[in-house]
Image (cartoon, rainbow, N blue to C red):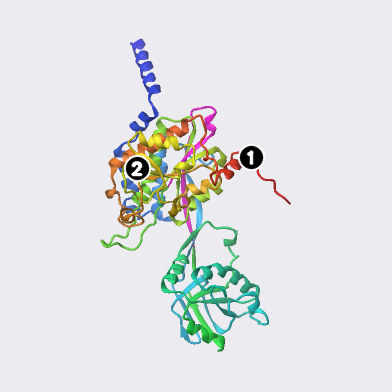
Amino acid sequence: MKFLLSIITFAFTCILTAQTDAEMALTTVNKNDIEGHIYFLADDVLNGRATGSPELKIAASYLANTMRGYGIKPNPATKSYYQTFNLLQTTPPNMLKVAINGDNYPHTIAVEANETELSGETVYLGFGTEDDYKGKNVKGKLIIVNGGTPESSDARAVYGAHKVKQQLAIKNGAIGMIEMTLLEEDWWSRISHLMGENVKIPDATDAEGSKNDFIHLWVNTTAEKLSAFNTSKLSYSIETDGKKEKTLVTQNVVGVLEGTDPKLKNEYIMYSAHYDHVGIGTPDAKGDSIYNGARDNAIGTTAVLSMAKNLGKYPTKRSAVFIFFTGEEKGLLGSQYYVANPLFPLKQIVYGFNTDGGGYNNTKLATVIGLNRTTAKKHIVAGAAAFGLEAIDDPAPEQGLFDRSDNVSFAKVGIPAPTYSTGFDVFDDEINKYYHQAGDEADSLDYDYLLKFYQGYVLSGRMIANDPETPFWVKGDKYEAAANILYGKVLEAPIKN
Ligand SMILES: [Zn+2]
């Protein structure tokens, strides 16, 4: 009996070792798992997974504990799957009233404003250039200037010049500045949007106590009204509850799995996707205000989970790091934070296989943003083809998609990193119907297509991770120079004193 058993065991081992990467991808990726992940991540109870929300923390727990179930390990140094950090959220004032010479100006934007009530005489200083201050004493006063420069007063010029003007005003001792703008309504609303809610990784300038009470406003008006400022004596009043700052606590979710090859295991393939979305927004025609983000990016998140399950069962020669990023929708913040605070040296990540997408309109494709830019192209093309999909590169380079997802945070430091996305060959209404819309829900997805999409991703990843040759940028790529420095292929340029 014992003899027989060992023969069976031997035969079984042979079958296992003979199993191809494609068979491994086929056996671990199935429709039930995929649907389970996507329906949970895009569930209304997660309220659209906004960065900093308690619901995003629930999603993070789901990802961490699903990885735990697959045998993927947490960061060995902290024993935690979470890379937790703070973000600084700034929101515009709820109330901002501005009057000049007794006239109310309803179109106002706070560039800088703490809670205040101010009034008094003011000085009009043209465009607020260095010359405009000559012979004027503005110490302790609020000044009024024109937005932009003498050359241009369009929105771009207003925005482009405002920081230098603010510094000049502060240097000359002013307590505040109103810039009068002459913008058309659509430009005014664009610039209002730009100055709306902002979330960023705090830096040294955000430290407590470093802020002063300088008030800086944009007030939109007409040329006719503005021309009167030249001659008349000016008075003003401002009342506002000020811009609000709030700290958002959030987390990337990170897991690692050691490779099987004694040498290649020192190199990591990163499998990544952002798991945040835009949260709750304007209701659609049906009154739905939850932006579920099934396509963007429960789909990508599920690709990384599919890889984690596969590698937990069948590890590759190279090691794996799985990263789920927070804050992508706020400006790639999670990936930027990771690159600035890596868990192990970045040069050990030899390839980033990111996945993200706004939707699909061609279920015969996998659209891989940056496909042609790395030497791993052959594996991605073959991986997708094994499951009946054609891998194509970015069909709409004018959209700058390569630079609009988390892959670029890694590419900038030299790590070859494309973004694997669901198939699209053109930006059309089928994409716009769901992209950042409340209707981007789990029910609206084609799971037969997604099964092939995930099997293709997993097989591509396996082939990249098992290839004795380390993937790299295609010669002449704009990030090749950064890669040569990162991976020590050239010495860093000496710093000249
Ligand atoms: Zn996305």
Q: How many marks?
A: 2
- Is 269 situated above or below 97? above
Does 424 lie within the magenta span? no
- Could one spot residue 242 in this view of the protein? no
Q: What percent of the width, then of the height, locates residue 117?
A: 52, 79
Query: Foreground residue, 268 or 206?
Result: 268
Q: Residue at x 34, y 38 (%)?
A: 389
Q: Is residue 359 left or right of residue 263?
A: left
The boundaries of the magenta stretch are 246-273
Judging by the rendered image, the residue that carries numbered circle 2 is 365
Q: Amino acid at mark 2?
A: Leu
Q: Is residue 111 left or right of residue 309?
A: right
Judging by the rendered image, the residue that carries numbered circle 1 is 490
Q: Residue at x 46, y 85 (%)?
A: 103
Q: What percent of the width, then of the height, locates residue 419?
A: 44, 45
Q: Is residue 192 left or right of residue 442?
A: right
Residue at the extreme left of the image, as rendered: 286
Characterize the magenta stretch by its predominant secondary structure.
Answer: strand
Query: Foreground residue, 277 or 20?
Result: 20
Report the disc number at residue 411.
Answer: none
Does 256 lie within the magenta span? yes
- Is 157 situated above or below 384? below
Q: Secondary structure at mark 1?
A: loop
Quadrant containing the N terminus in the rendered view: top left
In which quarter of the view is residue 175 placed?
bottom right
Does the Cβ of the disc 1 residue fall within 8 Å of ligand 1?
A: no
- Is disc 1 in contact with disc 2, using a CB cutoff of under 8 Å? no
Q: CA distance from mark 1 to mark 2?
A: 38 Å
Q: Earlier in the sequence, mark 1 or mark 2?
A: 2
Pointer 2: residues within 10 angstroms few (<14), some, or many (20+)?
A: many
Pointer 1: residues within 10 angstroms few (<14), some, or many (20+)?
A: few
